[in-house]
Image (spheres, helix red, strand yellow):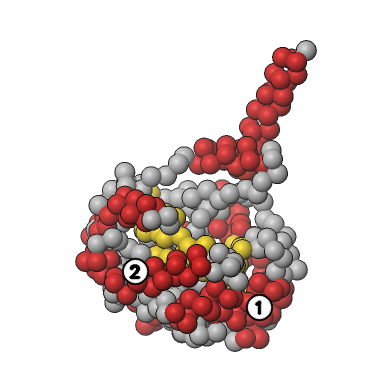
């Protein structure tokens, strides 16, 4: 009897795991009532010139500016009425250049429920002691820092105007300060974009930082919907492939400093503007006609109906240096953890680089 009951339990768990994987695939195309995640551009400037990023060119061509406090709080106030998983205060910029960032983080932390993660991704180049203190006191949950290499020469070549020693010194001080703080937040994650120019660095970068107790990840190079100059194959020597599907417009809203809501973090040319939060609610834009039409085209990967930026959107073929667990393994883990009521973890496909 005991054996039968154990066998039954195992079958039940197996079915649940299988259904979890299926459910996860189905959820990709379900449009929630409100975006699960937000990316808010509190200003549009950056102090770097990464070779894999369109910033330098776009900043010369497009209007640049700073989001007003009124607009920022309007977005957060609306979003805090829904079940937002993540609020990222960055989009195509360097968030730490915003002198009011701690105040904005604090505002979001006070409005959102406990389970909403407030985070930034930064190049880490301006981590002064004052900024570090401000970030810790603001209640920021996570900071992802993009460091393009372990070798100063590779780093400085890849990130344009930034200095390796200065960035790494700031990162070390941040890690130390977080450890010494009561809150132990923000969690620090280091990240490298795997390109042809740093491919020898990716493994050693991750090993170096992990040995020092810091989480380090790599992400695959994306051509930012055709907005990046590929430098004759230097950035993607193993070639590029079409994503053939995309979860971003089904999960996330991307809001520029002037209130424009763009299609995704690759839309540097601001080609698909879904609406503007100065005049509309974010929920209205999220369920708007244009957003739904584009989602339909993406879901079916209908080349005739896809916006031109999606047709030009490619990511690099993974190299050996970018180790990625197959998605089904992560989904299996997610489903297993779900049996015990744990929150779903993001697959790497779902972890977005969004500006870095
Ligand atoms: S351009 Fe289209 S396919 Fe590429 S990330 Fe944006 S929405 Fe997805
Ligand atoms: S990737 Fe980020 S840090 Fe580098 S230039 Fe672009 S916005 Fe700036």
Query: Which quadrant holds the N terminus?
Result: top right
| Residue beneath the point at 63% across and 32% down | 18
Pinpoint residue 276: horizontal percent, then vertical percent: 62, 77
- Mark 2 and mark 1 lie on one chain; the one further toward the N terminus is 1
| Nearest to viewer (mark 2 / mark 1) | 2
Pinpoint residue 261: horizontal percent, then vertical percent: 58, 72
| Residue beneath the point at 71% across and 73% down | 111
The residue tagged with tag 1: helix, strand or loop? helix
**Residue 85 in which image quadrant:** bottom right
115 or 58, which lies in front? 115
**Residue 137 in which image quadrant:** bottom right
The residue to which callout 1 is attached is 107
Disc 2 residue lies near ligand 2 with CB under 8 A: no
The residue tagged with tag 2: helix, strand or loop? helix
Packing grade of label 1 (10 A; few <14, some 14-19, many >=20) is some
| Residue beneath the point at 53% across and 75% down | 135
Q: Which mark is residue 168?
A: 2
Mark yes or no: residue 207 visible: yes
Seen as rendered, the residue at the extreme right is 1
Q: In this view, does 165 lie to the left or right of 69?
A: left
Tell whether label 1 touches label 2 (CB within 8 Å): no
Mark yes or no: residue 220 visible: no
Query: Which quadrant holds the C terminus?
Result: bottom left
Pinpoint residue 239: horizontal percent, then vertical percent: 30, 50
Q: Is residue 184 left or right of residue 78?
A: left
């Amino acid at each position: 009897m005991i054996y039968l009951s154990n066998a039954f339990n195992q079958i039940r768990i197996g079915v649940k795991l299988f259904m979890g994987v299926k459910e996860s695939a189905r959820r990709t195309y379900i449009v929630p009532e409100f975006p699960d995640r937000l990316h808010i551009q509190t200003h549009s400037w950056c102090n770097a010139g990464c070779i894999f990023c369109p910033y330098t060119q776009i900043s010369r061509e497009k209007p640049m500016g700073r989001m007003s406090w009124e607009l920022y709080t309007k977005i957060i106030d609306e979003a805090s009425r829904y079940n937002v998983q993540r609020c990222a205060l960055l989009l195509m910029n360097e968030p730490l250049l915003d002198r009011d960032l701690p105040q904005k983080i604090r505002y979001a932390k006070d409005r959102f429920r406990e389970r909403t993660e407030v985070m930034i991704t930064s190049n880490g180049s301006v981590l002064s002691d004052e900024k570090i203190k401000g970030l810790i006191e603001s209640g920021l949950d996570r900071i992802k820092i993009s460091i393009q290499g372990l070798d100063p020469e590779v780093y400085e070549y890849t990130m344009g105007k930034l200095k390796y020693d200065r960035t790494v010194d700031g990162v070390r001080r941040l890690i130390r300060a977080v450890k010494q703080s009561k809150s132990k937040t923000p969690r620090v994650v280091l990240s490298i974009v795997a390109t042809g120019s740093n491919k020898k660095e990716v493994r050693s970068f991750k090993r170096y930082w992990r040995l020092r107790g810091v989480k380090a990840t790599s992400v695959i190079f994306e051509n930012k919907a055709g907005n990046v100059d590929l430098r004759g194959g230097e950035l993607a020597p193993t070639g590029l492939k079409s994503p053939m599907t995309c979860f971003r417009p089904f999960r996330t809203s991307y809001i520029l400093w002037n209130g424009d809501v763009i299609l995704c973090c690759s839309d540097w040319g601001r080609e698909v503007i879904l609406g503007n939060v100065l005049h509309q609610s974010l929920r209205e834009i999220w369920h708007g006609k244009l957003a739904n039409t584009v989602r339909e085209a993406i879901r079916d990967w209908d080349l005739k109906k896809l916006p031109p930026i999606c047709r030009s959107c490619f990511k690099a073929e993974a190299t050996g240096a970018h180790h990625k667990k197959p998605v089904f393994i992560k989904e299996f883990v997610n489903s297993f953890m779900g049996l015990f009521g744990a929150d779903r973890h993001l697959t790497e496909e779902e972890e977005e680089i969004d500006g870095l």
